[in-house]
Amino acid sequence: MRIKSLCSLQWPVADLHSKTLEIRGINEREIISYLTEIGAYPVAEDNTLFQGKNWTSRIGEVSFIRMFQSDIPQISLIFESTEEQTLNSVIEKFRRKTFRAGG
């Protein structure tokens, strides 16, 4: 019996490549927007699971850290793909969306 991934029942766990990113300072609404801009669509009613071409992403629980009298959102994001090259490409595209330059 093969155990299936939580993200997609079509991919066996042994064949999955996975990477978790911790995003701070970007709210959940923006993360959802970035995921759709890089080619994903929601597959869960609560907008926590997204499917792209040969990859999935799951938004973890949102928490907040307190810094300089402000609440900063902190969100974990799990990307999975059966192809390591696809996973790396998707994460690179996502990181471009979330890049912030100081100034």
Image (tube, rainbow, N blue to C red):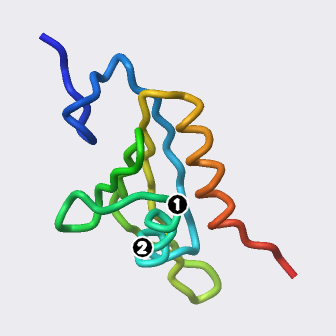
Closer to the chain start, of discs 1 and 2, is 2
Query: Please, is residue 6 above or below residue 3 in the view?
Result: below
Q: Name the residue under label 1.
A: 38
Farthest residue toward the left? 1
Numbered disc 1: secondary structure:
loop
Q: Quick one: quadrant of the C terminus?
A: bottom right
Query: Please, is residue 92 above or below residue 68 in the view?
Result: above
Q: Position of residue 57 (x, y in %)?
A: 39, 50
Residues at marks 1 and 2 touching, judged by CB atoms closer than 8 Å: no
Q: Is residue 63 left or right of residue 66?
A: left
The label shown at residue 3 is none
Q: Where is residue 87 in the image (x, y as percent from the top left)?
A: 53, 38
Q: Foreground residue, 70 or 62? A: 62
Q: Name the residue under label 2.
A: 28
Q: Quick one: quadrant of the N terminus?
A: top left
Residue at image location 64% in from the left, 57% down from the top: 95
Residue at image location 37% in from the left, 46% down from the top: 56
Q: Position of residue 98 (x, y in %)?
A: 63, 66
Numbered disc 2: secondary structure:
helix
Question: Gap in Å between the C-alphas at discs 1 and 2?
Answer: 16 Å
